[in-house]
Amino acid sequence: MSTTTVDAPPRAPRTTKQRRPGSRLKLRNALIGWTFILPNFIGFAALTLTPVIILLYLGFTSWNVFGAAEFTGLENFQRLAADKTFHTALFNTVYYAGFHIPLTLAISLGLALLLNRKMRGMAFFRTVAFFPYITSIVAIAVVWNMLFSPDSGVINQMLTAIGISDPPGWTTSPDWSMPAVIIVGTWRDMGYYMLLFLAGLQAVPSELYEAARVDGANAVQRFWNVTIPCIRPTTFLVTVMLTIASFKIFDLILVMTDGGPGTSTLVLSQYIYRKGFEENDFGYASAVAMVLFVICLGITVLQFMVNKRRNR
């Protein structure tokens, strides 16, 4: 019995991938980029993203730190609908944001316009305007509480001197405590946003102003037709940051009025703190935090949509 052997067909020569010139450089640049981004991303995931995910779960539970969280469905949100203190805190938060945002926006832009000039000592005045933002919030609250004192405060003494016989009670009055907080919050934040506007103003090409002057535009017309359109991206950034910061106001009110008198300055952030860390009702506090999160997210998305429509 004879066997026949069949020779295997010759293998095709292995083709080697030819790398593009510069591919190693791209890979190296990508790795360097990830090296810079990764620590920030890990910090964001560990300190922001993970707590938010846990909060979303706790909002549907009853949990007092001790023991396991008990899933309760929508019970916390049903409590919110009937909670008058929550309604007051929500109203006060909108009240604060509704006045603090436009006031800070207008005053910081005005300051930036005023300090965007080449004058001797301008750096000093810019530092003075920015200084409240880096000052301790406790020191600010103590000093302004002394100034707002109904009997011995400088502000009421000045109001009495100009003929106002019944000056406001400020932080001791339920009607005037929130305006007092808004005044202090605006005074503290205007320096920071002034710097952002200042950067935007200095990026406006001077040729545009010169062309407007040649066309006969006065100062008001140059402001509306040159300055405002050119700083629109900065205005949008400031508005978004200011909106989020206003709805999250906590430290100033905690130190200055502690939510009082009564609940006249109680805001959502402080209500979350009280429910969570003073009453150990973390499930309900998480539900309130979810409401605040949805409000901030909704307003921010709305602002992006309006800005996108304007840029078309």
Image (cartoon, rainbow, N blue to C red):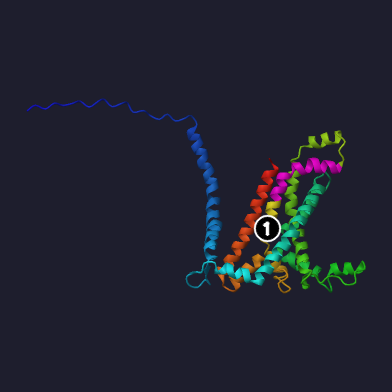
Residue located 73% across and 52% down the image:
193
Between residues 307 and 118, which one lies in front from this camera angle? 307
Please state which of residues 230 and 57 is positioned toward the viewer in this rendering: 57
Any part of residue 181 in sight: yes
| Circle 1: element type | helix
Relative image position of residue 84 (x, y in whole percent): 66, 72
Q: Is residue 43 magenta?
A: no
Magenta-highlighted residues: 219-238
Locate the N terminus by quadrant.
top left
**Quadrant of residue 97 in the image?**
bottom right
What residue do we see at 87% from left, 40% from top?
218
Residue under numbered circle 1? 245
x then y, percent, for residue 230: 75, 41
From the viewer's perspective, tell me whether residue 3 is left or right of residue 188.
Answer: left
Give the image location of residue 157, x and y in percent: 88, 69
Is residue 232 highlighted in magenta? yes
